[in-house]
């Protein structure tokens, strides 16, 4: 049977056209629907930084990311410091680019939360910290700040754990030498053979010994060691009187209430190394050399004279005294820390020590001294008349003349001597004197205005 090729071609074209009319619109519709779904919603595993945005459109994801950033900022999530000595980092140093982050994110996987930091504000903040950062540590801090903020994590930056904090050379930046005086001091030196002081960390003397005398002596040497460094003197108290073997200006008192403490203000770690050769001791501070040259200067030393106080006591014998208390001169001195750098020289007063003078006390007897007994020398007589005159006269019996004069008797002599053995007998009794007549009035007459009584007797 013959096939009509013309009819076959027509039928084939009609069939192809029919298929095209059915399937082409369907494929177009499916393709359009698929494109609309992918371009509007994030996948189930998509995140912007650490914020999940699964199933959300880009517009819906923005408030969710903003809410997460705000909640993170209110926590004070970032700190800086060593151990428990940490300080908060202001989140204002960080700026979050939320719109840019959502726009650049993949709908399937999401994307990073873009963050920028204020370079100038960050460096200014680090400059206000109690420790000094190196340039390498500043860059390390900035990198850490960006990475931590991108993930909205809570973290602490410890400068002591950075690579730049460890100095393998350990140069000697300060040292003192002295001699120990007791077994307690030697035990403290043994305990301080190698003490690590991390960046920002405190060092306390009482950690290595509690004997007050030994701790005070070792503390005074550590004070001298750290005075010529940038380390902060956190706690220090002098004695009321300067102890023996302690340098004036570096006195430290340590007891149950007081201690000596310093803080490492550098962003690198240091070590206190104590070496002992018999009683000779050397304390060294080793680590990275300081940027500035630091020295300690003692100035304005003064001596204050003591005064003497006199006290009186009835217990001492008359005319005696005793030294109750010896006088001690007072002293005062000023300690300065001088820092020299390319910017100039800074001189800062570390301490002014003042020791009051101790007065001398002298105790004297309060009893009056008895007058001295004077015995006149014996005189030899030349004749009897002289003896009689000496024995009977006014020299040895002055009261006889006084008595005779009082009694109205006379001695009948012209030379002032008396002869009591021969009393004088008057020839006639002496009549009483008649009083002179009054110039006015009669003494026996009554006075005008007075009553007249009878005669008396």
Image (cartoon, rainbow, N blue to C red):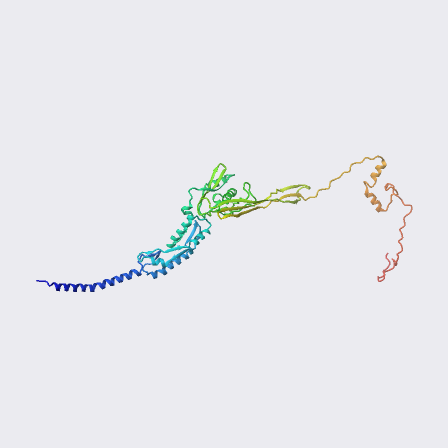
Q: Is residue 351 left or right of residue 7?
A: right
Image-quadrant location for residue 413: top right
Where in the figure is residue 155, as x and y percent of width and height?
Answer: 40, 52
Relative to 43, residue 364 above or below: above
- Residue at 41 percent across and 50 percent down: it is 139
The residue at the far right in this view is 427
Residue in the foreground of this view, choosing between 347 and 203: 347
356 sits to left or right of 204: right
The residue closer to the viewer here, 31 or 174, is: 31
In the figure, 369 relative to 62: above or below?
A: above
Q: Residue at x 83, y 43 (%)?
A: 401
In what quadrant of the picture does the C terminus appear?
bottom right
- Closest to the observer, 123 or 252: 123
* Image spot of residue 305 (x, y percent): 61, 44
Quadrant of the rendering where the N terminus is positioned = bottom left
Q: Toward the viewer: 436 or 177?
A: 177
Q: Is residue 232 above or below residue 276?
A: below
| Horizontal side, residue 42 vs residue 374: left or right | left
- Residue 259 visible in the shown view: no
Query: Horizontal and vertical percent for residue 366?
Result: 68, 44
Q: Residue furthest front?
A: 6
Specify whether residue 127 is in view: yes
């Amino acid at each position: 049977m013959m096939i009509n090729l013309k009819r076959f071609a027509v039928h084939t074209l009609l069939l192809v056209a029919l298929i095209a009319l059915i399937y082409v619109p369907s494929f177009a519709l499916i393709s359009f629907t698929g494109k609309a779904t992918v371009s509007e919603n994030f996948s189930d595993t998509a995140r912007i930084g650490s914020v999940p945005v699964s199933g959300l459109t880009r517009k819906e994801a923005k408030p969710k990311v903003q809410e997460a950033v705000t909640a993170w900022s209110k926590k004070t999530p970032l700190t800086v410091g060593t151990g428990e000595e940490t300080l908060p980092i202001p989140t204002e140093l960080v700026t979050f680019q939320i719109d840019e982050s959502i726009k650049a994110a993949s709908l399937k996987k999401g994307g990073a939360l873009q963050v920028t930091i204020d370079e100038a504000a960050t460096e200014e903040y680090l400059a206000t910290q109690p420790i000094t950062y190196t340039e390498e540590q500043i860059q390390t801090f900035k990198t850490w700040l960006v990475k931590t903020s991108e993930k909205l994590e809570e973290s602490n930056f410890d400068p002591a754990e950075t690579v730049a904090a460890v100095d393998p050379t350990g140069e000697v930046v300060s040292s003192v030498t002295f001699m120990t005086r007791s077994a307690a001091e030697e035990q403290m030196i043994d305990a301080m053979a190698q003490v690590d002081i991390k960046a920002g960390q405190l060092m306390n003397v009482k950690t290595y010994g509690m004997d007050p005398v030994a701790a005070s002596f070792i503390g005074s040497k550590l004070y001298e060691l750290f005075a010529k460094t940038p380390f902060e003197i956190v706690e220090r108290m002098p004695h009321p009187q300067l102890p023996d073997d302690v340098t004036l200006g570096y006195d430290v008192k340590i007891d149950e209430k007081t201690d000596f403490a310093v803080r490492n203000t550098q962003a690198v770690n240091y070590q206190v190394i104590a070496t002992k050769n018999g009683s000779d001791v050397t304390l060294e501070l080793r680590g990275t050399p300081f940027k500035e040259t630091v020295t300690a200067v003692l100035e304005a030393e003064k001596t204050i004279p003591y005064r003497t106080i006199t006290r009186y006591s009835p217990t001492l014998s008359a005319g005696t005294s005793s030294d109750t208390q010896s006088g001690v001169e007072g002293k005062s001195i000023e300690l300065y820390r001088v820092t020299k750098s390319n910017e100039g020289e800074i001189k800062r007063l570390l301490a002014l020590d003042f020791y009051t003078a101790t007065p001398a006390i002298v105790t004297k007897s309060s009893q009056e001294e008895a007058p001295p007994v004077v015995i006149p020398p014996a005189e030899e007589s030349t004749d009897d008349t002289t003896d009689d005159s000496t024995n009977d006269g006014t020299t040895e019996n002055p009261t006889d003349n006084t008595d005779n004069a009082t009694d109205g008797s006379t001695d009948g002599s012209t030379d002032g001597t008396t002869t009591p053995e021969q009393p004088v007998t008057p020839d006639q009794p002496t009549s009483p004197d008649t009083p002179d007549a009054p110039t006015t009035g009669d003494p026996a007459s009554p006075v005008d205005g007075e009553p007249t009584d009878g005669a008396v007797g």
